Amino acid sequence: MIVRRCWYAALLAVFMSTAGALDTLVPLSDPAQQALYDRLTEEVRCLVCQNQPIGDSSAPLAADLRREIHAMVAAGQSERETQQCLTDRYGGFVLDKPR
């Protein structure tokens, strides 16, 4: 009985450690696109945390923004196009260094 409880606790710990991962997105195959994605996730501000980049935030909205940026970069949008899309939707505050 105790062994079974320890086994369940260990299994739960494994699942909990993977649930807290910040980014589970597959890296982009093009190194230039991956570099753009990485740069944007450091330049886009978390709207929940406010002064933290989305690359460092564990807020659900930051994860949504990372997925959105990942999709835009994968689709071939430029840095400027991606930033414009984000500012159109969320306002200039979303950029760490607004234009």
Image (cartoon, rainbow, N blue to C red):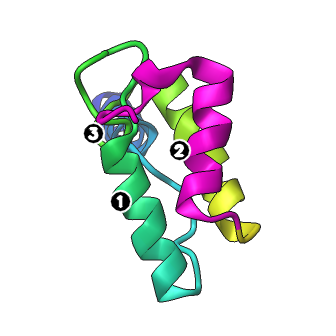
Please determine whether, in this image, residue 3 is positioned above or below residue 18: above
Amino acid at the residue labelled 2:
Arg
Q: How far apart are labels 3 and 1 at the CA level? A: 12 Å
**In this rendering, position of residue 36 left or right of residue 9:** right
Asked which secondary structure carries label 1, the reply is: helix
Where does the image place residue 63, in percent across and percent down from the top left?
Answer: 51, 35
Q: Nearer the viewer, mark 3 or mark 1?
A: 1
For residue 64, which quarter of the picture? top right
Q: How far apart are labels 1 and 2 at the CA level? A: 11 Å
Q: Residue furthest bottom?
A: 30
Q: Which residues are magenta?
A: 77-99
**Residue at x 69%, y 68% (from the top left corner):** 74
Mark 3 and mark 1 lie on one chain; the one further toward the N terminus is 1
Residue highlighted by disc 2: 66
Residue highlighted by disc 1: 39
In the rendered structure, find residue 56 and report the number of the disc placed on it: 3
